[in-house]
Image (tube, rainbow, N blue to C red):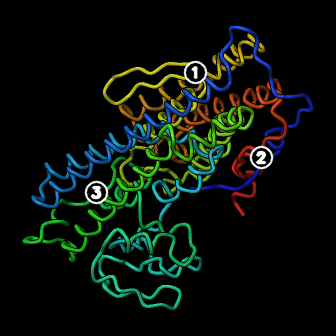
C-alpha cells in the first residue's frame, strides 16, 4: 500500500549545498551504476512475470480438477512468485512509474468481504467502507458510487474497475493478496498456529462448498490473468528502451537519488513502520502483510534482500544465474570508504536479523504468532529486524549527504514517528 507520511526526526528532508559527487578516475561511473540498476530491475520483474505465469498454470490445474493436491500446488506457486516480486519492491518510491503502478499488484491490507464469503466474526458492515461485505463472487449485480455494475461475467476488466471501489484503499480487488485470499481463505486463528484453511471444494462445481464455485473460479482466473498482464507492463517499462529505464538513466544525480530514496523509504517508512512496527504495537495479525498464507516472514526477508541488492548491485535469478555489475557501493566507496563499509555492515546485520526471523518462522512459529501479545521472545526477534532497518536508514541518510544529492524526501510512518497516535 502506498504511504504518504514524510519522515520526521532525522529521516525527512536532507539538504546539501554542494554539487553532485564527481567520481575519481577508475571508480564506477554513475551512468554505469544506473544502467546496471535498470538491468537488475528488468531481471527481477521478468522473474516475477515468469513465476506469475507458473502460478497461472497452477491455477488452471486447480480449476480444472479441484483437489487437495492441486490447491497445494497453487499455493506453493504463489509463495514462489512472491520471491522475485518482493526483491523488486526497492524500485518503488524513487521511481514514479513503479509507485504509480504498484497498487494494482500489492495493495494491502484488504477487506476480503469485498471479494467472497467471510466468517461471521468478520461482521457485516464498516463505517469506513460501504463495500465491506459486497461479496463480488456472490452478486452478479453491484452498485458502486450509485452506479449499477454488471458483474455477471467476472473478467480482468471488471476487477480493475472494482479495485479500490468507493476510493477506499482496503477494497483490494486485484493483485497478489486477492489471489492469496482466494487460495487460502481467511486465517481465523488469530495469533495462534495455523493459516487460512479454504477447502479445494470451494472450486469443485460438482461438490461445491460455500456456493458460487464457478464464479469463484472465474474470479481467481481473472485475478491471475490480470497479475500476469500487470507484471508484463513493468518488464516492458524496464527494458532498455522502456519508460522507467529511460527516466532513471536520463540524469545521473536524479537516478542515484532514486536508488537511495527506494532504499530509505522501503527500509524505514514502509517495511520497518507500516509492515512491521504497526502490527507489533497492536499485536494484531491483521496487520501482517501475507496474512492469509502466513508467508509474511519470507516477504519481509525478500524485501530486505532487495534493499541490499540495490546497493551492492547483485541479484540471484530464479534460475540460479548470479548478476553483478557497477554498484552504488562502489560509487560510495570511491567517495568515502568508511561510509561504504558502514552501509554494507548495516545491511548485513539487517539481513542476519531477517534470516533469524525467517528461520523462526519455518521452525518455531509463524509471523502472526511472533507479534502476538505476551510473546516476548517472538516480539524481540521482530523488533531486532525493525531496529536494523531503522539503523540502516540512518546510513542511507548519510550517503545522501555525502554524495551531495540535495533535498530528498523519504517515507515515514506514524508507527515509528508518533507511536502513541496509533492507539487513538
Of marks 1 and 3, the one in the foreground: 1
Left or right of 225 on screen, residue 84: right
- The Cα–Cα distance between marks 2 and 1, rounded to whole angstroms, is 25 Å
Image coordinates for residue 189, horizontal then vertical, percent:
38, 55
Residue projecting furthest to the top:
26
Residue 312 shows which numbered tag? 1
Q: Earlier in the sequence, mark 2 or mark 1?
A: 2
According to the image, label 2 marks what residue? 7
Image coordinates for residue 108, horizontal then vertical, percent:
50, 58
Left or right of 80 on screen, residue 7: right
- The Cα–Cα distance between marks 3 and 2, rounded to whole angstroms, is 36 Å
Residue that appears at 56% across and 47% down: 243
Residue that appears at 47% across and 68% down: 111
Q: Nearer the viewer, residue 214 or 293?
A: 214
What is the total number of numbered labels drawn onto the structure image? Answer: 3
Residue 183 shows which numbered tag? 3
Say which quarter of the image contains residue 31: top right
Amino acid at each position: 500500500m502506498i504511504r504518504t507520511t514524510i519522515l520526521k526526526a532525522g529521516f525527512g528532508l536532507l539538504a546539501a549545498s554542494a554539487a553532485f559527487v564527481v567520481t575519481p578516475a577508475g571508480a564506477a561511473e554513475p551512468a554505469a551504476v544506473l544502467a546496471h540498476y535498470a538491468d537488475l530491475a528488468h531481471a527481477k520483474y521478468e522473474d516475477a512475470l515468469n513465476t506469475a505465469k507458473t502460478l497461472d498454470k497452477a491455477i488452471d490445474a486447480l480449476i480444472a480438477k479441484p483437489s487437495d493436491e492441486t490447491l497445494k500446488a497453487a499455493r506453493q506457486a504463489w509463495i514462489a512468485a512472491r520471491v522475485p516480486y518482493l526483491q523488486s519492491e526497492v524500485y518503488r518510491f524513487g521511481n514514479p512509474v513503479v509507485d504509480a503502478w504498484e497498487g494494482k499488484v500489492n495493495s494491502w491490507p484488504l477487506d476480503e468481504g469485498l471479494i467472497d464469503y467471510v466468517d461471521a466474526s468478520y461482521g457485516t458492515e464498516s463505517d469506513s467502507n460501504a463495500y465491506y461485505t459486497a461479496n463480488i463472487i456472490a452478486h452478479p449485480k453491484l452498485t458502486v458510487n450509485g452506479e449499477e455494475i454488471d458483474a455477471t461475467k467476472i473478467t480482468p476488466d471488471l476487477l480493475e474497475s472494482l479495485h479500490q471501489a468507493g476510493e477506499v484503499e482496503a477494497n483490494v480487488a486485484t493483485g497478489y493478496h486477492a489471489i492469496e485470499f482466494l487460495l487460502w481463505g481467511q486465517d481465523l486463528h488469530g495469533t495462534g498456529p495455523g493459516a487460512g484453511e479454504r477447502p479445494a471444494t470451494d472450486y469443485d462445481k460438482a461438490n461445491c462448498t460455500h456456493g458460487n464455485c464457478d464464479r469463484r473460479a472465474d474470479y481467481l482466473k481473472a485475478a491471475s490473468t490480470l497479475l500476469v498482464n500487470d507484471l508484463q507492463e513493468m518488464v516492458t517499462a524496464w527494458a532498455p528502451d522502456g519508460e522507467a529505464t529511460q527516466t532513471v538513466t536520463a540524469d545521473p544525480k536524479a537516478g542515484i537519488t532514486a536508488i537511495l530514496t527506494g532504499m530509505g523509504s522501503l527500509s524505514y517508512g514502509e517495511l520497518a513502520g507500516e509492515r512491521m512496527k504497526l502490527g507489533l504495537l497492536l499485536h494484531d495479525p491483521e496487520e501482517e502483510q501475507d496474512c492469509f498464507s502466513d508467508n509474511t516472514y519470507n516477504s519481509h526477508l525478500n524485501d530486505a534482500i532487495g534493499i541490499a541488492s540495490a546497493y551492492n548491485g547483485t541479484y540471484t535469478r530464479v534460475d540460479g544465474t548470479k548478476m553483478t555489475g557497477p554498484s552504488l557501493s562502489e560509487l560510495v566507496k570511491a567517495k568515502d570508504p568508511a561510509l561504504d563499509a558502514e552501509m554494507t555492515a548495516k545491511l548485513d546485520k539487517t539481513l542476519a536479523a531477517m534470516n533469524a526471523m525467517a528461520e523462526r518462522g519455518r521452525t518455531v512459529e509463524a509471523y502472526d504468532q511472533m507479534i502476538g501479545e505476551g510473546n516476548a521472545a517472538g516480539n524481540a526477534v521482530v523488533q531486532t529486524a525493525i531496529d536494523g532497518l531503522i539503523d540502516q536508514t540512518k546510513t542511507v541518510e548519510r550517503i545522501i549527504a555525502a554524495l551531495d544529492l540535495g533535498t530528498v524526501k523519504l517515507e515515514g510512518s506514524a508507527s515509528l514517528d508518533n507511536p502513541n497516535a496509533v492507539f487513538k
